[in-house]
Image: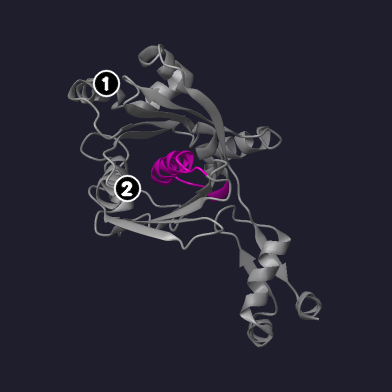
Amino acid sequence: MYGRRRALYVRQRKNIKIMGKVFKGLIFDNQVSLTIIDSTDIVNKAIGFHKLTPLTAAALGRSLTACVFMCSTMKDADDRLSVTIDGGGVGGKIVVCGDSSLKVRGSIENPSAVLPPNSKGKLDVAGCVGSQGKITVVRANGNHTPYVGSCNIVSGELAEDFAAYYAYSEQQPTAMALGVRVSKEGLCLGAGGVIFQPLPDTQEENIVKIEKILPDLNDVSYLIETLGAKGIKDKYFAEYDLEESFAEYKCICSDEYIDKIVLSLGKAECEDILKKEGKIEVCCHFCDKKYTYSKEDIDKLFG
């Protein structure tokens, strides 16, 4: 039943542009940057591509939400980033990528991973991610050498880990709530995040305001499910003018893109693979699309 309902959901939404929603702006005397993200549709698209379990949907979904936030801080059109989360958990390595247009994509090494609920009766995201490793972020644009930053994983719950990354690697205090709510049928009911970043010289009274709101955001996925990003904005930050934008899960693979990967192997390596396997098959890690090359295809490609 789980698989059939999920497949039906994916078929029903096949021709619908699946988007996330982002509200962003300054609050509390223009001293605090606020970002509210509804990534429910993005997570559902990832579930459809990767056949995620509820556990891995939560882990990858939180990572994709954090990626949307990081992309929303970019300034230039050609800015892009990739994040690798390698904590040694049962889900394996998580990779998420995105750009300044808020197009994101991601993968998790073991999408079928499962674990018993944690001590709170919730999905054991920390066990899926693991806590013996690092978050590594690579930021790049077309004109500069990529910037690489990293931070030890703190808990594996991801919100704390990304906040720690900002504190240690970018010297930016950050308070972050991330959540993904998944039904028994495997559909994401609500996913998103709320992120606060105090600007330099923020007054103590405005820090206190953040601290007072944070407990209400402990179950941010439920708030997204019931209120949506706009509902959270209207409930807690109605007096502030926040800019609205949209994010989406978008893979960049194409025939031309994969051709370049195959060409990079060199003709001799391709011929060796063909001799052993009879074909060359390349699978995109972000959308699971398979590209198959026959001997005729390789001859034409290198011709």
Does the magenta portion include 62?
A: yes
Task: Give the label, 2 or 1, closer to the camera.
Answer: 1
Side (left or right) of 140 relative to 18:
left
Q: Residue at x 45, y 30 (%)?
A: 37
Disc tally is 2
Q: Earlier in the sequence, mark 2 or mark 1?
A: 2
Residue 103 in percent (x, y) is at 57, 43
Q: Nearer the viewer, residue 196 or 218?
A: 196
- The numbered dot on residue 213 is 1
What element does badge 2 sit on? loop
Residue type of the residue flagged with mark 1: Ile
Residue 297 shows in the view = yes
Give the CA distance from mark 2 to mark 1: 31 Å
The stretch in magenta equals 49-75
Mark 2 crowdedness (10 Å alpha carbons): few <14, some 14-19, many ≥20 = some
Q: Residue furthest front?
A: 201
Does the magenta portion include 171?
A: no
Q: Residue at x 32, y 27 (%)?
A: 32
Residue 106 shows in the view = no
Q: Quadrant of the N terminus?
A: top right
Provide the residue designation for mark 2: 115
Q: Residue at x 75, y 78 (%)?
A: 298
Residue 267 in percent (x, y) is at 69, 84
Q: Would you say the magenta stretch is mainly helix, strand or loop?
A: helix
